[in-house]
Image (cartoon, helix red, strand yellow):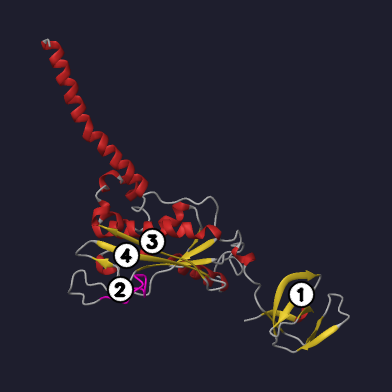
Amino acid sequence: MSRTSLAAALAACLAAFSAGPAVAATAQEQRAQQTAQIPVCSRNLGTLAVIEPDTNWWSANQLPSPAALIKVFVSRSHCFTLLDRGKGMAAMQAERELASSGDLRGGSNLGKGQVKAADYVLLPDLVSQNNDAAGNNIGALLGGLVGNHNVGALVGGLNIRKKTADVVLTVTDVRSSEQVAMSEGHAGKTDIGWNAGAGVFWGAFAGAGASGYANTEIGQVVTLAYLQAYTDMVGQLGGLPASASAANVQQAVAMQRPGRLFAAPDGRHAMRPLDVGVLLYPTGNRQGVMWEVEDELGNKGWVSSNLFGLAH
């Protein structure tokens, strides 16, 4: 082999050798981006309020509330219309107090009947370890701190020393109180080894009140655990109705004046008298002022809407 050919072969080998790690690194970064991908819904599932857990486990670890973290997921996934039931709600109520006292300018258009109702509430929390025979470690939710002097001494799903987190997300229908989804997530220190290749993902939290989760190791572990739980939760919610309000039963009404329950909307055949305070449950059918209702004994008939109001 000539010197020129040998030099060319050596150059090719060196080029191939040096290119190997770069390709591997790129593949690792691609896997990282896929792992850190927030799921996106094809349709809006309703309105959602994210609430804080009863036990404050995050302050001891210099982290903001996990509610801030979940709100980033919700906002970027487009799965729900996010409602503020925290500081924004308190500020809104203060403005409404100014309106009710007459201190706001005319035409402010601020008053009753404007606040959207939450269809669902989402609670992010840590998981309490449960070594029962069934192997279900959702068990009871976090019970509290055990000795502030002991680093990593949290009952349940956060181990500061080992850098692991076990979390749970619970979604509840506010009308029926039914838990429509419960999902669990786990992450450890080894899951954030790709951190350098996922800057775009972590940057999403910087301006959303959740920067502590991006800037600390335990925060990143908790984030990935919640992301796993949120991804699983979205998969569980595919069967939710297009309108949570319409899918639930109608709100009960109470007789405000005495009347009668009729067999038909024409009011010709009375079935039974209805005293003040009797609870009735509208079926959704109505003709003019006559509404079809059921009473608490299972009788179905018609009554004038002029005689009842919403039950309190």
Q: CA distance from mark 2 to mark 4?
A: 14 Å
Residue that badge 1 annotates: 292
Q: CA distance from mark 4 to mark 3?
A: 18 Å
In the image shown, does 215 or 101 lie closer to the viewer?
215
Left or right position of 152 against 75: left
**N-terminal-most mark, 4 or 3:** 3
Which residue corresponds to the image point at 45% horizontal and 60% vertical from the top-left? 233
Q: Which mark is residue 108?
A: none
Q: Is residue 129 magenta?
A: no
Marks 1 and 3: which is nearer the front?
A: 1
Amino acid marked by disc 2: Asn
**N-terminal-most mark, 1 or 3:** 3
Amino acid marked by disc 1: Glu
Q: Taking the image as drawn, is residue 65 in sight?
A: no
Q: CA distance from mark 1 to mark 2?
A: 52 Å
User: Predominant secondary structure in magenta?
Assistant: loop
Crowding near the residue tagged with mark 1, few <14, some 14–19, many ≥20 C-alpha atoms within 10 Å: many
Q: Position of residue 29 (x, y in %)?
A: 30, 42
Q: CA distance from mark 1 to mark 3?
A: 44 Å
Marks 2 and 4: which is nearer the front?
A: 2
Residue that badge 4 annotates: 166
Left or right position of 124 against 244: left
Marks 1 and 2: which is nearer the front?
A: 2
